[in-house]
């Protein structure tokens, strides 16, 4: 009987719809990057942030990087703003400011990345 219950649970669990997430990867091509895992929702839903600049790494999940926290995130039809703060939410560590454009199946996003105390770069992005 326990086996049937376990099998039934597995069938139900695998039949539930998966919550889709996709990475938005932004980089200047050489010195800095801001990668963010976004949930598939009607509003912007930031899951994970990874930043690299000036030979330093920050992450909301990677234990080997300096810890950061998700700050504000804002999206309109043609803009995305995402901030990452220190783990105490005392200071902004990184700011991503993007403009988006699309035509048919063509999609592009680009803008600026600023990492406090390290620098600022023009970035292009690929992803959702």
Image (spheres, grey):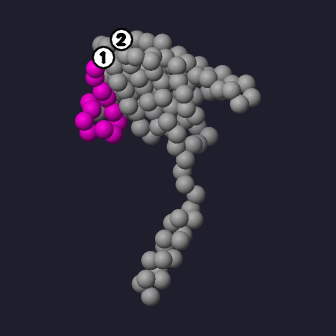
Residues shaded magenta: 55-66
Mark 2 neighbour density, 10 Å: few (under 14) some (14–19) many (20 or more) = few
Q: Which residue is mark 1?
A: 54
Instruction: Give whichever of 47, 104 is nearer the camera.
Output: 104
Looking at marks 1 and 2 on the same chain, the residue that comes earlier in the sequence is marked by: 1
* Residue 127 x, y percent position in the rendering: 55, 32
Mark 1 neighbour density, 10 Å: few (under 14) some (14–19) many (20 or more) = few
Identity of the residue furthest to the front in this view: 30
Location of residue 105 by image quarter: top right
Based on the picture, tell me whether residue 57 belongs to the magenta stretch: yes
Location of residue 102 by image quarter: top right
Q: Is residue 86 visible?
A: no
Residue ID at (49%, 36%): 23
Q: Which residue is mark 2?
A: 119
* Residue 14 x, y percent position in the rendering: 53, 64
Q: Secondary structure at mark 2?
A: strand
**Numbered disc in front, either 1 or 2:** 1
Q: Is residue 18 left or right of residue 78?
A: left
Dots 1, 2 in contact, CB < 8 A: yes
Q: Is residue 53 left or right of residue 102?
A: left
Q: Which mark is residue 102?
A: none
How many numbered circles are shown?
A: 2
Residue ID at (58%, 34%): 128
* Residue 75 x, y percent position in the rendering: 57, 28
Identity of the residue furthest to the bottom in this view: 1
Residue ID at (40%, 16%): 30
* Residue 90 x, y percent position in the rendering: 30, 25
Instruction: Give whichever of 84, 128 is nearer the camera.
Output: 128
Instruction: Give whichever of 62, 70 is nearer the camera.
Output: 62
């Amino acid at each position: 009987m326990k086996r049937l219950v376990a099998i039934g649970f597995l069938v139900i669990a695998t039949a539930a719809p998966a919550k889709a997430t996709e990475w938005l990867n932004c980089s200047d091509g050489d010195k800095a990057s801001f990668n963010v895992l976004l949930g598939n929702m009607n509003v912007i839903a930031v899951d994970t942030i990874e930043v690299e600049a000036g030979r330093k790494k920050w992450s909301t999940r990677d234990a080997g990087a300096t810890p950061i926290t998700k700050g504000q995130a804002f999206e309109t039809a043609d803009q995305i703003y995402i901030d990452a703060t220190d783990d105490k939410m005392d200071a902004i560590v990184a700011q991503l400011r993007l403009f988006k454009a699309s035509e048919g199946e063509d999609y592009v996003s680009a803008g600026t990345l600023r990492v406090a105390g390290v620098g600022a770069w023009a970035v292009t992005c690929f992803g959702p």
